[in-house]
Amino acid sequence: MNRLKVTLPDNFSFSTPLTIRLSDLNYGGHVGNDAILSILQEARQQFLRSRGQEELNIDGHGLIMVDALIEYKKELNYADSIIVSVVAVDFDKMGFDFYYKIELIQEGKSILASRAKTGMLLYDYANKKKVPVSEELIKLLS
């Protein structure tokens, strides 16, 4: 079976510690795939806030996710401490990609748990249309 692979950038411009919550677990007792997307969203929002932006108010517009790719490497469980690293790259006229690295912190070591990428567009929610990414926003997020 062919597997999709996420090739991470060499450097990340932001990292945040998070703790796995009980609500992140699925019926298998570990973090569910839906919860990984929520963890990525939390890290993305923290990244944006560190630059004075928010998902629904970024350069005067919002972000909308157009694709997501997650590669699972290690199971995560309740109360696990993780570090989520984020970087924005691959800017074009209408959007860009976020890359994420989720690392489990155990006994002072970091173990790769997931690699992920989300494709994002700048979006005018009021008028329901895509809007171009400004050069200023590219500089701010890079």
Image (cartoon, grey):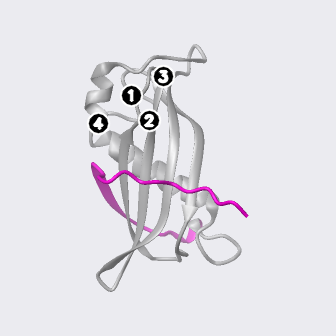
Whole-angstrom CA distance, mark 4 to mark 1, is 14 Å
* Residue placed under numbered mark 3 in the picture: 94
Q: Nearer the viewer, residue 4 or 20?
A: 4
SS at circle 3:
loop
Q: Image point 48% across, 22% down: which residue? A: 94
Identify the main secondary structure in magenta: loop
SS at circle 4:
loop
**What residue range appears in magenta?**
1-23
Q: Is residue 40 magenta?
A: no
Q: Earlier in the sequence, mark 4 or mark 3?
A: 3
* Residue placed under numbered mark 4 in the picture: 142
Q: Amino acid at mark 2?
A: Glu
Quadrant of the snapshot with the N terminus: bottom right
Nearer the observer, disc 2 or disc 4?
4
* Residue placed under numbered mark 1 in the picture: 58
Q: Amino acid at mark 1?
A: Ile
Nearer the observer, disc 1 or disc 3?
3
Q: Amino acid at mark 4?
A: Ser
Few, some or many residues within 10 Å of mark 4 (<14, 14–19, 20+): few
Q: Earlier in the sequence, mark 2 or mark 3?
A: 2
Q: Earlier in the sequence, mark 2 or mark 4?
A: 2
Q: Is residue 99 above or below residue 71?
A: above
- Farthest residue in the bottom direction? 107
